[in-house]
Amino acid sequence: MADPRAEILARVRTALRDRPAPGPVPREYATTREYPDVVELAAERIADYRAEVRRVDEDGLPAAIAEALRQRAPRSMIAPPGLPRDWHVDGVEWLTDEPPLTVDELDAAGGVLTGCAVTIAETGTIVLDAGPGQGRRALTLVPDYHLCVVRARQIVATVPEALARLTPDRPLTFVSGPSATSDIELDRVEGVHGPRTLDVLLVG
């Protein structure tokens, strides 16, 4: 029996035999846009996804982390490798991912605290690339609560600007609000594919 895939590809090649070779893909589209305040735009768009957003300054960051955790009262928090030590505030049990936590341990944790690689203001999307202070993908997908720190210098206006900052061979996780989906009757269900609660601290 002939290989179906090979047969289909052969038919495609035959159909395209008299077509000119493809040229370069034009990329004259706009890659950036100017906004009066890209940080404020990011805050608005992230909040549109039902995430809790707070603006803080650098000196007030540890206190803001402590306040967020006081309000959510998680039983424990995961600290990815490379998370700044002054983010490990008192009043909560901190779990390290070295050696890697099991899935059961991740599920039992109250939440995770991370930084990010870049944030897209137009879409309200936070991107993690498993760098220092972000950890492996499972850390932000299994726990029910994600507290994320985003610095103003990490915010760009558009998707093309964000992609220019990212390394494509890293494991990228795009976060647009807490995890949510809808069934056929459009009933919203949260926490299916990741945390049901997302708090974001915008620094700067």
Image (cartoon, grey):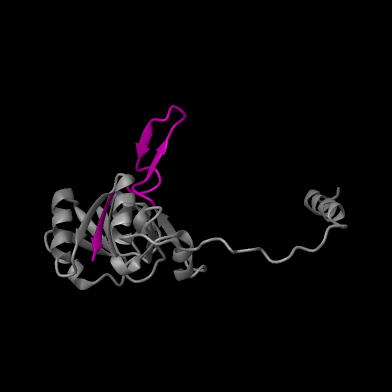
Badge count: 0
Nearer to us in this view, 13 or 37: 37
Position in image of residue 149 (x %, y %): 27, 62
Please say if 134 is above or below 7: below
Q: Is residue 3 magenta?
A: no
Position in image of residue 99 (x %, y %): 33, 68
Residue displayed at 44% across by 27% down: 185
Residue displayed at 23% across by 64% down: 203
| Horizontal arrangement in the rendering, residue 63 relative to residue 139 (left or right) | left
Q: Say if residue 99 shows up in the picture.
A: no
Residue displayed at 73% across by 65% down: 23
Q: Quadrant of residue 65?
A: bottom left
Q: Quadrant of residue 17?
A: bottom right
Nearer to us in this view, 192 or 106: 192
Nearer to us in this view, 155 or 105: 155
| Horizontal arrangement in the rendering, residue 105 relative to residue 5 (left or right) | left
| Horizontal arrangement in the rendering, residue 195 relative to residue 10 (left or right) | left
Q: Quadrant of residue 38?
A: bottom left
Q: Is residue 181 magenta?
A: yes
Q: Say if residue 115 shows up in the picture.
A: yes
Of all residues shown, which one is farthest toward the top?
Answer: 185
Picture quarter with the C terminus = bottom left
Q: Which residues are magenta?
A: 176-204
Nearer to us in this view, 182 or 6: 182
Position in image of residue 164 (x %, y %): 48, 69
